[in-house]
Structures are given as structure tokens and as C-alpha cells.
């Protein structure tokens, strides 16, 4: 089966602006926030969704996670520490992540390494989750084999009863990660596949250097 796509068909009414070294912000995080706000403005579905890729013993695995903030010049996400992704990260802290916002024809690609958020920050974020999501964190033995959905719902009901009229504390196996980027690429789709690609890369002095790539 052949698949033909044209990026201009999915940009809707978004008006492209020139994107070059000269008008790209010197700070990649400020540039990210600018594009992220555009994604919000044009109502991109799940704008915080990013594909996170991990690697363990040369085997690469990818999945979608949600960005929960930008802190300490890092991208933050949360997960079960017993999950496949966490197992991979424990073995190899290098990761890659990609945001794709089709309504504005832009993507952001990130390469870097990760470390866990501190316990206090994990507790604070966990407290903001809905009560049922908190219970779900206790009920799910993430990435392990599950007999059927009925088993999961039964466990959820048991835990819900256990915490009835009680504050739900964060499980010690549930926390977050900070992605500390060493490379961030901003990609803007253009006509005739002549896309704009601006890369920020940290040099030996930990300062960002910008350059343009061929599409």
C-alpha cells in the first residue's frame, strides 16, 4: 500500500513565518515555549504529548508520555518507576523525545539524559492529580502482564476502598524524570520539502550553539 501525504493539507489556517538563525531565540527553552503557545492557540490535540525513546542493551523502545513542565532547564514527565521506560533509563540514562504539532506544521526533537525529580517535587505533583488517577497509580503494576481488565478494575476497587476518606500518598515506586537536553532541534515544515531545521547544541562550555541543517 502506498501512502501519499502533503503537509500543507494538515496545516489548516496557520500562517507560516520565516524561521531562521537570525530570528530563532538564543535560548532554546524560550523558543520551545513560543512554539508551544502557538500549538495551544491553534488547538493542537494533546500539545504536551511527546514520543519518548529509550534504549536498553541496544534495543530501542518508544511510547507517548505527557510533558508536565519545564523546570531547571529540563523537560519533566512522570511515570511508574517499575515501567519498561524506567527499567531502560536505569540501564541507560540517554533518551530522545519528539513533539509533533501537525496543525502548525512544527516538531521539536530533543536528545539528552535524564535523572529523577526529587521526592518533594514528586509529592507536590502527585497531589495535583485527580483522586482516581492517584488510585490508578497504586492499582497498576505497569508494564507487567495482566490477566484481564476485570482483574485491574477489581484491584482498583479494593484500593479505592482502602483509601476511603483518607489522603492518598504517592507510591514510592511512582515519580518523575527531568530530561536534561544536550541537543534540541526545531523543525518547521515548508513547501517543496525545503523545511526549516534549526539545531541548538551544547558545546564543551555548556553553552548553546545554533546552526541550520539541510532538510
Image: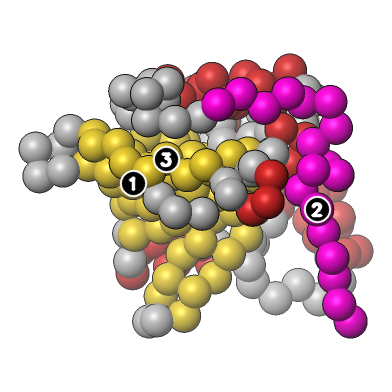
Q: Real-space Cα distance between discs 2 and 1?
A: 28 Å
Identify the mark at residue 6; answer none if there is no mark: 2
Residue 115 can be seen in this image: no
Mark number, residue 183 = 1
Identify the disc placed on residue 198.
Answer: 3
* Badge 3 element: strand
The image quadrant that residue 36 belongs to is top right
Residue at the extreme left of the image, as rendered: 205
Q: Bin the neighbour count of mark 3 within 10 Å (Cα to Cα): few under 14, some 14-19, many 20 and up.
A: many
Image coordinates of residue 200 in percent, x first then y, are 33, 39
User: Where are the magenta residues, as a range?
Assistant: 1-18
| Structural distance between the alpha carbons of marks 2 and 3 | 22 Å
Q: Is residue 176 magenta?
A: no
Helix, strand or loop at disc 2? loop
- The location of residue 27, given as percent across then percent down, is 33, 24
**Above or below — where is 37 with respect to 60?**
above
Amino acid at each position: 500500500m502506498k501512502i501519499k501525504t502533503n503537509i500543507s493539507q494538515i496545516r489548516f489556517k496557520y500562517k507560516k513565518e520565516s524561521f531562521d538563525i537570525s530570528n530563532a531565540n538564543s535560548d532554546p527553552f524560550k523558543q520551545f515555549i513560543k512554539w508551544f503557545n502557538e500549538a495551544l492557540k491553534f488547538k493542537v490535540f494533546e500539545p504536551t504529548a511527546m514520543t519518548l525513546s529509550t534504549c536498553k542493551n541496544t534495543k530501542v523502545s518508544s511510547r507517548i508520555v505527557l510533558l508536565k513542565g519545564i523546570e531547571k532547564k529540563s523537560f519533566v514527565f512522570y511515570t511508574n518507576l517499575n515501567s519498561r521506560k524506567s527499567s531502560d533509563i536505569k540501564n541507560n540514562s540517554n533518551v530522545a523525545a519528539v513533539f509533533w504539532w501537525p496543525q502548525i506544521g512544527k516538531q521539536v526533537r530533543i536528545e539528552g539524559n535524564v535523572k529523577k525529580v526529587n521526592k518533594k517535587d514528586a509529592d507536590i505533583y502527585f497531589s495535583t492529580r485527580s483522586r482516581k488517577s492517584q488510585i490508578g497509580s497504586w492499582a497498576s503494576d505497569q508494564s507487567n502482564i495482566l490477566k484481564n481488565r476485570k482483574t485491574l478494575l477489581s484491584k482498583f476497587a479494593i484500593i479505592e476502598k482502602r483509601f476511603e476518606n483518607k489522603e492518598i500518598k504517592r507510591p514510592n515506586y511512582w515519580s518523575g524524570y527531568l530530561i536534561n537536553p544536550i541537543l534540541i532541534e526545531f523543525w518547521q515544515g515548508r513547501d517543496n520539502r525545503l523545511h526549516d531545521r534549526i539545531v541548538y547544541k551544547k558545546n564543551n562550555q555548556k553553552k548553546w550553539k545554533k546552526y541550520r541543517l539541510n532538510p
